[in-house]
Amino acid sequence: MTETYTALTETVYYILLALLEPNHGYGIMQDVEQLSEGRLKLAAGTLYGALTTLVERGWIRTLPNPIESRRINYQIEPDGRQALNHELNRLEELLANGKKLLKEQK
Amino acid sequence: MSTKKNVFQFFALWQHEKEETWLNQMAAEGWNLVSTTGLTYQFEHSDTEAFTYRLEYLKESPRNMVNKPYFDFLAESGIEVVDSFRNWVYLRKPAELGPFDLYSDLDSRIEHYERIKKGYMSILGIVGVVLAINLWDYLITGELPVSAFLIVLIGVLGWGYRSLSTTLANLRKKRKLSE
């Protein structure tokens, strides 16, 4: 199935980045906060909802956690990686256009 | 001084943010919620333990096991389930672990309000019809005081619907411009 890519939300974008390596819920929160230098603090309800949707979509998957069965680990899937790459191209375009046009204004 | 108290307080279904604010004010005075029946609230006093409280309306009853993975997930960041009433779950997080919010974007906030509204509509559907049928009966038999009382009740229910719809519409308007 071919996916049509629209803009990812900030929440989804950062979750996918945090899941390039296996990670659990609380770890994702901490990583995203660190990556965004404290700007984005993912709240637990929002994160859980997004993770559930992403698993259903097949962009990430759950991994069995051998040490703590209650703590679920997640990792990115090829489809999720592809979505990230598309988003990166889109963001580069946004950034380039914004910089160019704002500079012309000055 | 007694370390426990039981408080009677009424909040309508669409007033959960007010209820949350009230619970956090109580907590700021050292009175931590430990259980609730929906109309009465049991608090325990503590000078050392401080919590932030949040309410969430779940799709399935909080007593249903389908919510267990979610509660386990919340526990990872120190959030614990205090009690539940119907589909509402009362959550708290120790203040020393940092700020506590359940939602960090508009989409999830909108989804939450949609769940609340859906739950409210299912009640409204049944109660509203019963009230309207009764009102009709009392009106044709000319029982004005009872009729007036029923009209007020229907008005309150309508006000709740309006309140939820307005909040949702405002969130959706905001979402058109940003996340």
Image (cartoon, coloured by chain):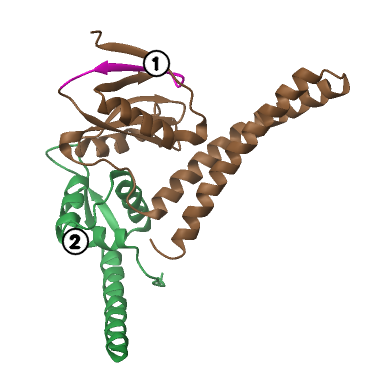
On screen, B55 above or below B172? above
Circle on res. A36: 2
Q: State yes or no: residue B155 in magenta.
A: no
Chain A rendered in what hue? green
Which percent across, then down, holds residue B84? 39, 25
Give the side of residue B104 with respect to residue B113, left or right.
left
Circle on res. A89: none
Circle on res. B7: 1
C-alpha distance separating marks 2 and 1: 43 Å
**Visible in this render: residue B23?**
yes
SS under mark 2 = loop
Q: Residue furthest left?
A: A67
Which percent across, then down, holds residue B75? 23, 35
Which percent across, then down, holds residue B48? 15, 23
Q: Nearer the viewer, residue B101 or A52?
A: B101
Which percent across, then down, holds residue A19? 20, 58
Q: What residue type is labelled 1?
A: Val
Q: Which residue is drawn at 33% across and 58% down?
A: A58
Q: Residue furthest top?
A: B1
Q: Residue at x 11, y 38 (%)?
A: A67
Give neighbour class at mark 2: few <14, some 14-19, many 20+ (Cα, 10 Å): few
On screen, B104 above or below A88? above
Q: Which amino acid does label 2 sit on?
A: Ser
SS under mark 1 = strand
Residue B141, quarter of picture: top right
Q: Nearer the viewer, mark 2 or mark 1?
A: 1
Q: Which residues fall within the magenta stretch?
A: B37-47
Chain B rendered in what hue? brown
**Visible in this render: residue A70?**
no
